[in-house]
Amino acid sequence: MADTDLTAAENFKYRIRRDTSGAAAWFRDNWRGKRWFRWGSSSLGALLVVSLVGWTVLTSGLPDARALLQYEPPLPSVVRGADGEIVHTYARERRVQLQFKDFPAQLVNAYTSAEDETFWTHGGVDFTGTLNAVFDYATKKVTGGGRAVGGSTITQQVAKNILLGSEYSVTRKLKEMILARRIEDVLTKREIMELYLNEIPLGRRSFGVQAASRAYFDKDVGDLDLHEMAFLAILPKAPERYGRAANRDDAIARRNFVIDVMEENGHITAAQASAAKAQELGLKRQQPEARSADAGYFLEEVRRQLIARYGEQAEDGPHSVYAGGLWVRTSLDTQMQAAAQKALRAGLMRFGGGAGWHGPVATLNPDNGDLTEQLASSNIGINYQNWRVGVVTARNGSSGTIGFANGDEAPLTGLPDAIKVGDVTAVTPSGNAWAVRTVPEVQGGFLAQDPNTGRIYAMQGGFDFRLSDFNRATQAQRQPGSTIKPFVYATGLDQGMTPATMVPDATYCYYQGANLGEKCFRNFGGGGGGEHTMRWGLEQSRNLMMVHIAMDAGMENVTRTFERVGIGKYDNYPAFALGAGETTVLKMVNAYSSLVNHGLQHNPTVIDYVQDRRGKVIWRADERPCTGCNMAEWDGKPMPRLREQGKQVLDPRTAYQVTHMLEGVVQRGTATVLRDLNMPLFGKTGTTTGPKEAWFVGGSPDIVAGLYIGFDRPRNMGGWVQGGRVAAPIFKEFVQNTPGKWQGRPFLAPAGVRMVRIDRRSGKRVFDGWPTDEPMAAVIWEAFKPDTEPRRSSRQDETDQLRDLILAQLRRSNRNARGGGDEVREEAPPTDFAEDQGGLY
């Protein structure tokens, strides 16, 4: 058996040697004897070598078609408000991702008819179309006729758009063909079509048919008519050409061609084709992305935080703002945001709207080209009543021409002397022309927060985000003036004082050293004298009483309180107790939130949680674990309880005592403008040296808001300016415009607080009278920590009071006997309601 096998093997080898030697001999004889054979063989060998090298070059470094199985297209991030409604999208391109089943069948047929009739049958490359493209390319290379037709199948376009790029070369076309064959081996036809319809660039910054449907027709793909589907199908060829009004006739001709092909392919009937071709294009004018709230400052703060956490572009990571497809739930309350914007704008207009034109919003250079095009690219705008922003394109005396970002121009009348060509200004309609309007030079910041969670409801950082993106609610460092005083009082209460403690309202001087000498403080408007309760000093914002309290409590303790509640870190100088340091509206609102929340402070947040493109939560502001919250079945134990969140920055009793005194500021102090709102409110006004800023911070147990107004480059606003006159009315309008948000819930005292009846002026305890709802009532409830309330009067005090009462009755009887009337007058309340100013005098 082995011999037989060996013989067969030797026989096979013999035959191989014989045949090979015969072929070699034949090749050798022909090579030596025939010149044409040598040329042909050399050419064929060279062609094989070149083909091998070319194939190696083309295929080396090609993307792996299997990457499309995990491909995630760049998607914009979507922002939702507190109610779950979409309020904004962070997008530089319009993109919406759909599944194949979401695309209407006729839309798919329109694209195959326009781009790739054999899509459902070819293996990735249509060789007939490729040969036509090669012929067209060669012809145009010779004649210089421009760019050749592509000849690409839909699969090739997917390879180009996602994996290769749009380089115009023969090499790229060959790579595209190789990749197309590989893609067909990896993906199904439906998957390829889904990628194509979601990724194809279609003009107007739109990628994919859903985004384009919205951009051109303001419709979803499921609502498109046949002629609209056919129009979208012509866009891959030349989106910028067919999408322009100037090329309407070309677009209609190309659209009708696609409709005819759809009829030839049996996708539609002749009647449907005829009806579709009779339709106009019906393109909508390009519109900015819609959002339900004009909340530029809030949304920019959200964007800034997202970029800091996840990056901006796709190369920064899978969850980038402009490519990661994030779903962001924010704390934005659209009603409160609109009310904050309206109230702040109204306050700014009251203060500075009547001033003369103080200069342009911006200035454009006519030498840099068309002014209206420059304006369009500048993104400067305004959303206030019927105002528009335009650029002066011509001037002739007191009249001229105004140009707008959309290219329109119109007459401009009543021009200020200083305005010139290139100036960007606000204007309003005036008859058949436009008139210049003045955007207030004074600015301000407003912020509203939930004190129980730290969630920010509204944020307005200026008159209009389109005019200035500097956020004065979070970025402007300003002196808070008297709004800082409650925290000085809190320090005094922690050091043993009470709301009924009598404090001198007298000049306070102290020695600052050999170089500075002695410094003396005074009240706003002068005056002072005597002693008054701490409550009265806070309600009337008395600077001298403030300095006495700060120095008695210890400035090191005062500044420590400022730092603990997050206002700022300052040196131990008395001026900082009067608000001479710098802080922001955000920090002041968050500090006041700790007062109303019994000393518990939360980090202020604008984002509740972030989801990735698939809906998985990847970050949340509230990180408290909830053990057992997601159990499959109830285990019979008590329901899970979340631990308290936040940081205790003040004694709960101290926080309530200050809040209770700040209610008096609204009832009979510097913020009485709010009293007729008839709801439990607390707050404090503030006016800084100059005055340069006017402040108000306050609210309810559920909402705390704060604001300031002032010039961006601080300067005197006018001697009449006070927080109670300028800032508090803005807060009042905010409350009036959000009636459903204010529950009217009273401020509740924490454990360890004793409510005691006292005489409002003297601070002494009262046993024979009861508080009333009258703001100026003599007897009020006051909050005390245990064993700090005023003691009962001594026997001698009671004897003296009885003697005074008997003498008063005797005097009254004598007057009556003489026929005189009896007129009893309550002591007039203090009339110095002017807001004391922070800083040194």
Image (spheres, rainbow, N blue to C red):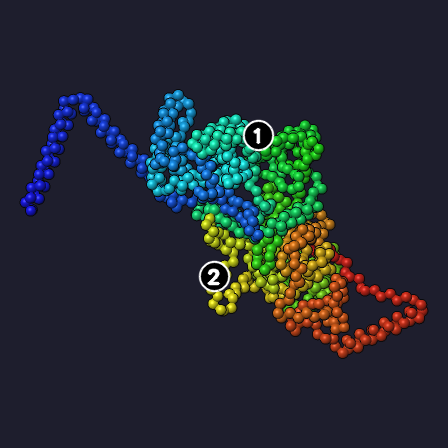
| Callout 1 crowding tier (Cα within 10 Å): few <14, some 14–19, many ≥20 | some
Residue 530 spot, x, y in % from top left: 75, 64
User: Residue at 55% across / 54% down in the picture?
Assistant: 605
Is 285 drawn above or below residue 3 in the view shown?
A: above
Q: Residue at x 46, y 63 (%)?
A: 631
Q: Earlier in the sequence, mark 1 or mark 2?
A: 1
Query: Residue 198, can we see it?
Result: yes
According to the picture, the residue beneath numbered tag 2 turns out to be: 630
Secondary element at image label 1: loop
Q: CA distance from mark 1 to mark 2?
A: 62 Å
Say what secondary structure mark 2 lies in. loop
Please identify the residue farthest to the right as the structure is shown. Answer: 818
**Percent position of residue 722, x then y:** 71, 52
Farthest-out residue, left: 3
Q: Nearer the viewer, mark 1 or mark 2?
A: 2
Farthest residue toward the bottom? 795
